[in-house]
Image (cartoon, rainbow, N blue to C red):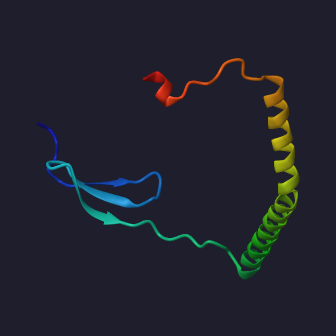
Amino acid sequence: MGLSDEAFEVSCPDCGGILKIDPVSRAIIAHTSAPKKKMFEDFSEAARALRESDQRRESLFRQSVDAEKNKEDVLAKKFAEAVKKAKESPLTERPLRDFDLD
């Protein structure tokens, strides 16, 4: 057939791991994980990232507090708008109920 019966290696484009594949069974017979990358190059970079995440968390908390303070006003405005819309379009006929269909 021309295909070699020797296993061959393929590099994963996503993670960089190496897969050893048997061409006959088309099965992965070995796997070598990609080397783990350092998350940060040095301590100062890690500290800066931590400060940024703290600032982001604080900002999200302030936004949630502000949203909770305004929640009652927003709900009152939504209710007033729904009442206004209901008054503008009164029902001309009774809505059908389940037992009306019998």
Place of residue 21 in the rendered image (x, y in percent of width and height, measured from the top left): 24, 54
The furthest residue to the bottom: 43
Q: Along the line of sight, which residue is nearer the eye, 27 or 3?
A: 27
Residue beneath the point at 66% across and 73% down: 40
- Residue at 81 percent across and 49 percent down: it is 75
Q: Is residue 64 above or below residue 91?
A: below
**Residue lying furthest left:** 1
Q: Position of residue 90 (x, y in %)?
A: 77, 23
Residue 88 left/right relative to 91: right
Task: Please identify the quarter of the rendering in which residue 66 is found.
Answer: bottom right
Q: Tell which of 63 and 45 is nearer to you.
A: 63
* Left or right, 20 with reference to 16: left
Instruction: Locate the N terminus and report the quarter of the image it occupies.
Output: top left
Q: Who's the residue at 42% across and 23% down the image?
A: 102
- Percent across and percent down for residue 36 are 50, 71
Q: Nearer the viewer, residue 31 or 101?
A: 101
Is 32 drawn above or below residue 79 in the view shown? below
Above or below residue 74? Residue 16 is below
Q: Where does residue 13 sit, x and y in percent of width and height?
A: 45, 51
- Of residues 101 and 50, which is closer to you in this image? 101
Q: Residue at x 44, y 65 (%)?
A: 34
Report the number of discs: 0
Q: In this view, does 38 lie to the left or right of 100?
A: right
